[in-house]
Image: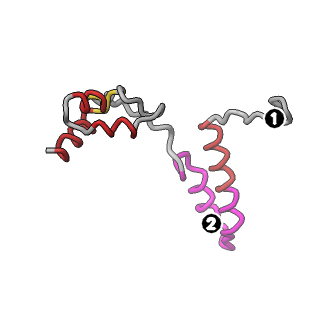
């Protein structure tokens, strides 16, 4: 680890595929030590099962999904009279007053209000 100044070490980035492989390998090694089969053929079958590529983990799963549709902002809903003006107090830098909500959130608010 490198020193990030002021005596703090900077965290190293984790490569997800390498980390997954290390965890898998460690767990397989653990399973080999706790399950001992005196029968040579049975032990060989067990070890072969542990060595299969898809044992415990499968490759990365990529999912192509369209982005959620956007609806109105809380500001727009307050300006339209749908929500009370006090909803401004719920907003923060993490949820700006004029940030568009997702359409399903917009519809859920409308359904609750009406």
Dominant SS in magenta? helix
- Numbered tag placed on residue 48 in the rendering: none
Task: Check if residue 34 falls in the magenta segment.
Answer: yes
Looking at the image, is mark 2 or mark 1 earlier in the sequence?
1
User: In the picture, residue 91 is in which quadrant?
Assistant: top left
Please report the residue visible at 60 percent of the width from the left and 37 percent of the height from the top: 17
- Numbered tag placed on residue 1 in the rendering: 1
On the question of residue 69 being in view, the answer is: yes
Give the side of residue 21 with respect to residue 62, left or right: right
Q: Nearer the viewer, residue 89 or 2?
A: 89
Q: Nearer the viewer, mark 2 or mark 1?
A: 1
Q: Is residue 31 above or below residue 106?
A: below
The span picked out in magenta is 29-56
Give the side of residue 49 with respect to residue 39, left or right: left
On the question of residue 70 being in view, the answer is: no
Residue 100 position, x and y percent, is 32, 27
Q: Nearer the viewer, residue 41 or 2?
A: 2
Q: Residue furthest left?
A: 114
Asked if the residues shown at circle 2 and circle 1 are in contact, with their CB atoms under 8 angstroms apart, the answer is no
Q: Nearer the viewer, residue 32 or 84?
A: 84
User: In the picture, residue 64 is in which quadrant?
Assistant: top left
């Amino acid at each position: 680890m490198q020193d990030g100044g002021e005596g703090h070490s900077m965290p190293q980035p984790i490569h997800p595929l390498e980390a997954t492989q290390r965890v898998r390998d460690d767990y397989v090694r653990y399973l080999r030590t706790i399950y001992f089969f005196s029968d040579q053929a049975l032990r060989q079958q067990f070890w072969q099962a542990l060595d299969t590529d898809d044992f415990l983990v499968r490759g990365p799963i990529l999912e192509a999904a369209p982005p959620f549709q956007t609806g109105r902002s809380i500001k727009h809903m307050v300006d339209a009279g749908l929500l009370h003006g006090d909803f401004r107090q719920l907003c923060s830098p993490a949820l700006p007053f004029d940030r568009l909500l997702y359409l399903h959130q917009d519809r859920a608010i409308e359904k609750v209000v009406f």
